[in-house]
Amino acid sequence: MKVSVITVCYNAVAHIEETIRSVMVQDHADIEHIVIDGGSTDGTQEKVKRYAECIAHFVSEKDNGVYDAMNKGLRLATGEVVAFVNAGDMIATRNTVGYMVRAFGERDADVIYGDALMVDPDDITKVRRFWKGGAYRRENFRKGWMPPHLGTYIRKSAYDRFGHFNTELKVSADYELMFRFLYKNHSKARYVPKVLVRFRLGGVSNRSLGHIWRANVEVYKAWRMNGERVSPLIVLRKPLGKLLQLVRRRG
């Protein structure tokens, strides 16, 4: 089974190499690594080109944001399953992709998610939040829940059927995509009890209180965009869920 791993980056010279290496060391042989760069000017392009033999596609050009870049990667992907690991983030262990390939072979699912470690942006050994997935329950979306997109592997056929990221949303298009696939269209989802990704905090939806608020407002908007009803209190339930993750933090 071919797996397309998509990495999006912009001026990420300090961390892009460790991300690429986390893909390179995977023990599953059939991986298509796609790197989409937003036209970096800090040396990121040169770093990526050092690994040209290990990268199936490298595109460097101006984009309209991270979700536009992700869509570019999806349009290039030819694997049966797609995963994202963005610059500065790492696939958790060298057997992760192989483990997920076996999981898709054993389970009737379009979407398989696991656990995620959210680490300090300056020290990846310090775990700030531990996201524990648990068995899939569709109604958890009403609490603002979603599987972390970077800790979720999705069949390419699901993207082909239900579409890509909605770039009208600037900080929560990943939530809207998961909501559209899982809640609205009832894609089959399964959970595996394995840490799949280690990613740095400080992404587009967590940069400031303003961004956090906007992300939660966009969560509410995602329901309305898809013709579904939910209480406006969902904008508060999602942050409360993150507080529980802090309690579960593992050092």
Image: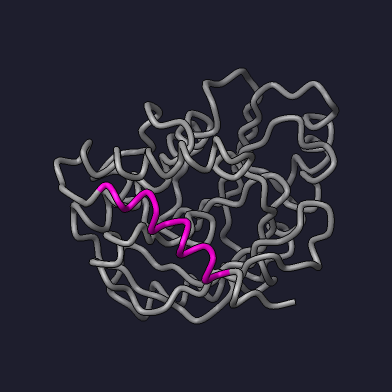
Q: Observer-nearest residue: 32 or 240?
A: 240
The answer to whether residue 116 is left or right of residue 13 is left
Measured as percent of width and height from the top left, residue 209 is found at: 58, 41
Q: How many marks?
A: 0
Q: Nearer the viewer, residue 230 or 54?
A: 230
* 244 in magenta: yes
| Place of residue 113 in the rendered image (x, y in percent of width and height, measured from the top left) | 44, 68
Please state which of residues 143 and 139 is positioned toward the viewer in this rendering.
Answer: 143
Which residue lies at the image location 85% right of the left edge and 28% below the top edge? 43
Check the image and report above or below for 23 versus 215: below
Residue drawn at 18 percent across, 53 percent down: 185
Residue 186 included in the magenta stretch of the image: no
Please state if 96 lies on the left or on the right of 80 as rendered: right
At a point 15% along the width and 48% down the height, the residue shown is 229
Image quarter (top left, top right, bottom left or bottom right) of the C terminus:
bottom right
Relative to 231, is 25 above or below?
Answer: below
- Check the image and name the residue furthest to the top: 62
Color style of the picture: one colour
Bounds of the magenta segment: 232-245
In percent of width and height, residue 159 lies at: 33, 46
Question: Seen in the image, is 89 located left or right of residue 67?
Answer: right
